[in-house]
Image (cartoon, grey):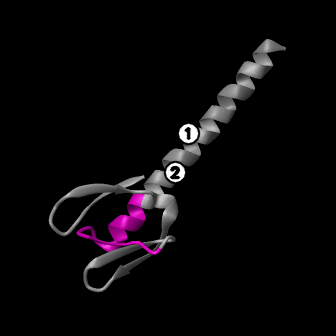
Amino acid sequence: MIQVRRINGERFTINADLIETVESTPDTVVRLVNGHRYVVSEPMDEIVDLVVKYRRKVFFSFISGEALAARAEEEEQ
């Protein structure tokens, strides 16, 4: 999930896994796979950076969890 701001400054959260496209028209428009569109104040590059950071965080927490589980399994043997 990423936090963004509407044009009026109101903060809200978007599920980064549902983002289909991000356009700069000149306002930044985020379109989700379900067709919903959101006009946000963050520039397109910042939205992309937020999604990349979110996915890294999820990926590394998953990898760390697997590593911990493997170590625990080895210790049990």
* Picture layout, residue 35 above or below residue 68: below
Q: Name the residue at the right extreme.
A: 77
Please name the residue shown 61% across and 35% down the image: 64
> x, y (%) of residue 26?
26, 85
Please name the residue shown 41% across and 67% down the image: 48
Q: Name the residue at the left extreme.
A: 8
* Picture layout, residue 6 above or below residue 59: below
Q: Is residue 49 magenta?
A: yes
- In the rendered view, does 40 fall on the left or right side of 73? left
The residue that mark 2 highlights is 56
- Residues packed near mark 2 inside 10 Å, few (<14), some (14 to 19) or many (20 plus): few
> x, y (%) of residue 49?
40, 62
- Quadrant for the C terminus in the image: top right
Q: Name the residue at the bottom extreme.
A: 25
Query: Amino acid under label 2?
Result: Arg
Element carrying mark 1: helix
* Quadrant in the rendering for residue 62: top right
Q: Nearer the viewer, residue 13 or 73?
A: 13
Which residues are the magenta region?
35-50
Q: Nearer the viewer, residue 61 or 18?
A: 18
- Residues packed near mark 1 inside 10 Å, few (<14), some (14 to 19) or many (20 plus): few
* Quadrant in the rendering for residue 42: bottom left
Q: In the image, which disc is placed on residue 61?
A: 1
Element carrying mark 2: helix
Query: Amino acid under label 1?
Result: Ser
Please name the residue shown 79% across and 20% down the image: 74
* Picture layout, residue 55 above or below residue 77: below
* Quadrant in the rendering for residue 45: bottom left
CB under 8 Å between callouts 1 and 2?
no
- In the rendered view, does 73 fall on the left or right side of 58? right
> x, y (%) of residue 39?
28, 73
